Every structure is written in C-alpha cells, then in structure tokens.
Image (spheres, rainbow, N blue to C red):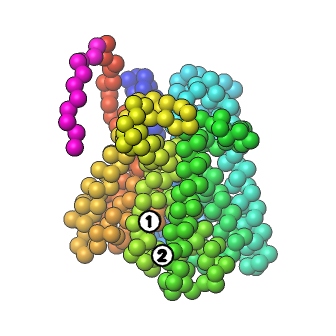
Amino acid sequence: MRRLLRHPVRLVPFGFLVTILLGTGLLMLPWATGEYRYTPFLTALFTATSAVSVTGMAVVDTPNYWNGFGLAMITVLTQVGGLGIVTGATLVILVVARRLGLRSRLLVQAETAEFGIGDVRRLLLRIAGLALVCEAVMTAVLTARLWLTYDYPFGRALWSGVFHAVQAFNNGGFALYTDNLVGFSTDAWVTVPLAIGTIVGGLGFPALFEAAREWRRPSRWAVATKLTVWGSLTLLVVGFLGLLAIEWANPRTLGSYAWPDKLLVAFAQDAFIRTGGFNVLDVEELEYESYPLVIALMFIGGGSASTAGGIKVTTFFLLAFVIRAELRGEPDVTVGHRRVATASQRQAITVALLSVALAACGTVLLILLTEGVPLYAALFEVTSALTTTGLSVGVAADLPESGQLALIVLMFVGRIGPLTLGSALALNTRRRLYRYPEEQPIVG
C-alpha cells in the first residue's frame, strides 16, 4: 500500500474498481428491482460499471427493471464516476480538514489532468460549482416542462429532471424511458438543455474555465484549450451536417420529420453521439453510411479532464498537427505560434494506438464469442463501450456472459484511460541518467 501511495496515478483505477464493486453489491439487493428479486451478479456488475464509467449501456430495460432505489444508485454512481472518485474524495478532505496535503493534490492532478498543483483547491471548488449550477439549471427546465406540459405530478417531474440532468452533465446516457429520449425528439425544451449540458460536461474543466476567463482573447488560450474548443466545434458541425446529409430522406429516422424538426433532432443527436449516450433517433434504424461517422465521433470523444470518454479531442487534433508537420518537413509541431512538447506528441500517439488496438481486439473477440453478429455491429458496440458512449444497436443485451464481460472490461479501461492504466501498471518507473546513441531506422 505504501508503494501504491507513492504513485497517486495508481489509485485512480483502484478507486474506480472499488466503487464499481460497491455499486454491484447494492444493485444486487432485492429492493433495487421492481419485482424485489435478487439481480444476477453479471447484470449488476454490468450496470454498475456502465454507471461509474458514465457509459449508459444497459443489458436490461432500465426504467422497468430497476425501482426507485436502484435508479437512485445508478444516479449516484454516475455522478461519482463523472466527477471522479479522487476528485470527490478530495472535496470531502477539503470540507472536513479545510486544507489539502500534497498527496491529495497529486491525486486530483492524476484524475483531472490539471498541471498546476497549487491551483487544485480552486479547481475543485470550481468543478463542484459548475456541476451544481449546470445540473440545477437543467433540472429546473426539465421539471417545469414535464410538469406544465406533460402533466407529470410535480414529484415525478422533479425526479425525472434530476435523473436526466445528472446523466447529461456526466455524459451518462441512462434514461427513464424504454425508448430513451426518442419520445421527446422534437421537444426543444427537453432535448436542447440536455444537449447543451452534455457539451459543457464533455469539454473538459481546465479548457472550459480558461475559455470562460479569456473569452474576449482566444488568441491567448493555451494550446490544449484551443484544440479542445475549436476542435469540439468542428466535430459538432461535421456531425450535424453528416447526419443531415445521410439521414435526411430516411423514413425511419429524420425522413419522418418536417425540416425544422430535422434540424433540431440532428443537432440533439449530434451532441449526444460523442459519449453523451442519449438517443433521440433509433440507432438501429440509421443508414449504414451513418455508422462510420458515428463510430468515428464516438472514438474521438470529448475534451481532456472531462466527463466524456474517447481518445479526446485534444489527442485527435494534436495528431493532425503532427501529421501536418511531418508532411511539410517541419522540425517542430506548432499550434497557434506555440511549439508542442515532444512528450505530449508521444502521449497522443500512445493513447491513439492503444485505443485502436483495444477496439480492434475487442471487435474480433466479440465476433468470436457471439455467432451471427455483423462486423459493423460488433465494432459499434465495442467502440461505444471503450469510449464510454453507451449508444447501442441492440447487441449488448443479447450477448452471452463472456461477451458482456468483454464489454465490462472495455468500459472500465475506457473510463480510466489507456495511458492512465498503463502508468498504473508500470510499477517500476525510472528515469535513466544516460542516453544511447541516436539512429534513424527506415520508416515506410
């Protein structure tokens, strides 16, 4: 344990694992289900992992299988998983002890990817405040809409508002309706607040705070903030236009709506694709041409140090700048008149290649474990689990136990991150005091 505490990054996977196991135990209790029966271990483990990893993928009908206690547990697990085990624990330390030790600050640094140790206290308070404000605003709007327009009793409207607000900000994707949010697809008072909450939660706290502080002078943003903000906007536009172009005439999706509703539904679904997990369109009815677009957007995911998954927007666009510099024969990779450190480039390449390898291996494994699953469906489910998105083409619930275990592992790895997992497993990290002679092997 002392060796573990010397390297705080190793506590991140351990903290998530303990929380998943605790959630599994609570969800197995008979009073967590609608029929007051014991939940099978694998079903509880899958649901707890999906909630803590803020994936939202389910193997049972969430609103009908779980009762109020079970849904409350899913909400708590999603909130804890979204904001981070270590962040939440350090907030408790901050409230109780009124100060932070160096070890606590290092723990939060490992979880939130914050670079400045001295700013951890302020960062934690701002993260908690942002989450509280965003979820409160979404809750208020949804509660009022469901109460006044859909004639929900106030208590039910409030519970639905709280549940979906937590899921949206934390990029969870669980819903209290069997068809997810398809029934509210054309209701802007429901879908737009949830879409905005998903976008805000998926931007990443450091980038979001800096962009808000220096919104008048974007040129002064750090490289990570520029890549996150402008990259996210680019992906939103690409996804929106792509869905419109492909699904416009599809009678099973956008083709059944009037053109104003098509714009609204396409925007909402586009916002939910990159790890949000909600769906206002039946994913199983999408045109086959839409699946590569959706898989690519899920794979990229959201911003670094956010509630979103994927390889992260910063990683994807940093690699684009690396390729650009290499093609142009430039010695340095520059973004906005700033030279990107070699260590950052290596980290981006490592994260991307590990994620590609995990997605490929997971897809092959799922096909081998399940007979009759098309390649596109296996790739979709694996990418959704690995990037903690939660969208599904209906395969997860029908998988054998071995297939569900594979998705559980992918959701866990996708939440803590391939690089974090690799760092946690590297028990003997040393810095060499010497360098070997350089050589340039032939590439290509």
Query: In 3D space, how far apart are the residues under numbered discs 2 and 1 (Cα atoms)?
Result: 10 Å
- Magenta highlight range: 434-444
Image x and y of residue 428, in percent = 31, 24
Vertical order, 376 against 79 (above or below): below
Q: Which residue is mark 2?
A: 246
Amino acid type at image mark 1: Leu
Vertical order, 338 against 242 (above or below): above
Q: How many marks?
A: 2
Image x and y of residue 349, in percent = 36, 41
- Drawn side of residue 391 relative to residue 166, left or right: left
Determine the residue positioned at 50% across, 48% down: 313
- Mark 1 falls on what kind of element? helix
Q: Which image quarter: residue 262? A: bottom right
Image x and y of residue 210, in percent = 66, 38
- Drawn side of residue 193 relative to residue 332, left or right: right
Image x and y of residue 249, in percent = 51, 84
